[in-house]
């Protein structure tokens, strides 16, 4: 009975999310159509809607805050100029994130080619093993996962990933794109996206394991001290 209720809730939640995404896609297509028809002010609606997410995405990609504003402007300028080429076969968000990703890639290849050149370093390691998460990681309380310190640790773990892995992880797990959408944004095959995502998640999990184990141990010692 409980399983059926849980399944029902998950199904309803999934349907609501799908319906919301369809509504957003339809709304974006309407705005795009208005811009293409000459209502150039309508493009500001798209800028206001997506600039926060695009800024965050670019900052995660280039790790150079001094350049993010310029890349953000370049992204939206490229999108505006290419709006007539938006066919609508994918969501506007997917299309825009692909432009942002390509903009960041061009900047990195020109100014920091080593970042992109060695972006598949994790994938080339022969000594990597995929092991189950430790009991300490699984049993970590939610409030610890959501603590500011935990968030900072998570951010550092993500930022330490090679470029391609970091980008795939952020697109899938932070921005919420589907594997198919990430594949389009990254212009990579779905198997390649799955492989990078799996390895990125594993690497982040391993980076966090020791931290959570240490936190749990400290909490137990503190609790034990209070009982003494």
Image (spheres, helix red, strand yellow):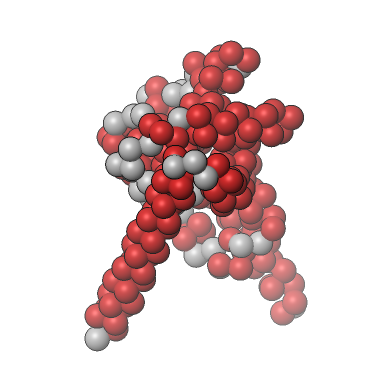
- Residue at 51% across / 59% down in the picture? 136
- The picture places residue 107, in percent across and down from the top left corner, at 59, 20
Judge left or right: residue 226 versus residue 24.
right
Judge left or right: residue 176 versus residue 208.
left
- Toward the bottom, the furthest residue is 1
Pick whichever, 115 or 17, lies toward us: 17
Pick whichever, 108 or 79, lies toward us: 79
The quarter of the rendered structure image containing the N terminus is bottom left
Tally of marks = 0
Q: Is residue 37 above or below residue 125?
A: below
Residue 210 visible to the viewer: no
- Residue at 58% across / 55% down in the picture? 213
- The picture places residue 148, in percent across and down from the top left corner, at 69, 58
The quarter of the rendered structure image containing the C terminus is bottom right
Pick whichever, 96 or 146, lies toward us: 96
Residue 220 visible to the viewer: yes
Q: Is residue 138 above or below residue 117?
A: below
- Residue at 50% across / 65% down in the picture? 139
Judge left or right: residue 18 versus residue 69.
left
- The picture places residue 112, in percent across and down from the top left corner, at 61, 16
- Toward the front, the furthest residue is 38
Quarter location, residue 88: top left
- Residue at 34% across / 62% down in the picture? 18
- The picture places residue 192, in percent across and down from the top left corner, at 32, 31
């Amino acid at each position: 009975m409980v399983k059926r209720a849980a399944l029902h809730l998950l199904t309803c939640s999934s349907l609501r999310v799908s319906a919301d995404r369809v509504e957003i896609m339809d709304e974006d297509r309407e705005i795009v159509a208005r811009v293409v028809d000459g209502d150039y002010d309508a493009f500001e609606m798209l800028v206001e809607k997506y600039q926060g997410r695009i800024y965050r995405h670019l900052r995660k990609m280039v790790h150079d805050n001094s350049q993010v504003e310029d890349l953000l402007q370049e992204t939206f300028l490229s999108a505006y100029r290419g709006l007539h080429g938006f066919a609508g076969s994918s969501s506007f968000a997917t299309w825009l994130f692909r432009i942002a990703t390509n903009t960041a890639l061009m900047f990195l290849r020109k100014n920091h080619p080593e970042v992109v050149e060695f972006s598949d370093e994790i994938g080339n390691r022969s000594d990597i093993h995929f092991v189950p998460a430790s009991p300490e990681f699984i049993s970590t309380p939610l409030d610890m996962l959501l603590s500011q310190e935990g968030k900072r640790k998570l951010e550092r773990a993500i930022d330490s990933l090679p470029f391609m892995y970091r980008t795939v992880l952020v697109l899938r797990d932070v921005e919420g794109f589907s594997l198919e959408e990430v594949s389009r944004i990254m212009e990579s095959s779905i198997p390649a996206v799955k492989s990078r995502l799996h390895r990125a998640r594993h690497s982040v999990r391993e980076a966090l394991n020791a931290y959570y184990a240490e936190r749990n141990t400290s909490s137990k010692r503190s609790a034990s001290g209070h009982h003494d």
